[in-house]
Image (cartoon, rainbow, N blue to C red):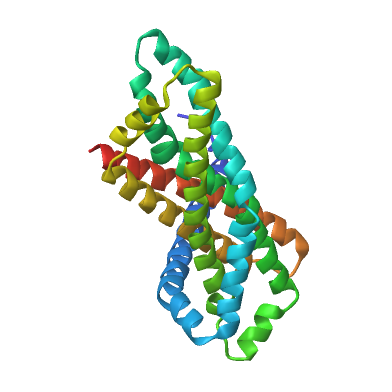
Amino acid sequence: MNFPKPDLNKAWGQFRFLGALGAAAIGGLASLANIFGLFYRLLTLGLVGMTRYRLIRREFARQIYLIGGRGWPIVALTGMLLGLAIIVYASAQLAKIGGEQFVGNLLVIIVIRELGPVLTALLVLLRSGAAMIVEIGGMVLEREIEALELMGLEPEIVIGGPRFWGLVISLITLYFIFVVCAVWGGFLFSQIFADMYWGVFWLSFVNALGWPDLVLNFAKVVLFGMFIGVVAIYHGLQTADHWESIVAQTSRGAVISLLFLGLINTALSVLYNV
């Protein structure tokens, strides 16, 4: 009996594919472990560094100004536009069925619970997270990180600490601005474009808002800020000795941050509804 000869090239191609897949999985797990290790160091030693060194406190204040002080106009405008969209489109439909009292529920669900934290985090990621990776990557190329190590200082603490906590504090502040602008923008547009009494608007909003919503979204915003910050710092420090590496690390950092945002938002939303 003649048996067919095995196709060695095809078998070797399958083994190479499995090997590449396994190497990618191991590399991804190693990067994830390094990110969580850096996250632990920033949580424990980042605050200690800010209490010891005036330079770190100054950089912390600078990061709050760059992220929050310069970023609030676009966040406020986005919030007002979201409030306008909810009022213009939702109130007209609710008015047909006599459900104007549910406008407050929509604002709580869409602005405070779901889209508010996510949109604010996305704006900070696009504007400041990517810029942080480029900034730290430039420090690596200019040998500033190496100089800090030669001086006996830890770059993760000196460089990462103020940026990590500055981004978290700024994101909390920007989320508050987003919510205020969305709610007040919705109220103002409801008086202009929709035939809605102001008392009905505020009564429905206050009745729909509860402590679980505030706690949930505070947790979302804090975790969003922490993971955007730690991913940006990690990928900035991973930059190699050429400028093309900054582009690659910025792209990877943005994708990984988006994955973290989606996972955190889904997990907390499911936990809230359990």
Q: In which quarter of the image is the C terminus?
A: top left
Q: Quadrant of the N terminus?
A: top left
* Residue 17 visible (yes or no): no
Note whether 223 is above or below 52 in the view shown: above
Q: In this image, 97 relative to 195: left or right? A: left
Please name the residue shown 38% across and 52% down the image: 218
Question: Horizontal and vertical percent for residue 126?
Answer: 62, 49
Please name the residue shown 58% across and 55% down the image: 253
Please name the residue shown 64% across and 62% down the image: 66
The foreground one among 251 and 233 is 233
The foreground one among 113 and 4 is 113
Question: Horizontal and vertical percent for residue 47?
Answer: 45, 76
Please name the residue shown 54% across and 38% down the image: 79
The foreground one among 161 and 79 is 79
Q: In this image, 124 relative to 200: left or right? A: right
In the picture as drawn, the residue positioned furthest to the left comes out as 274
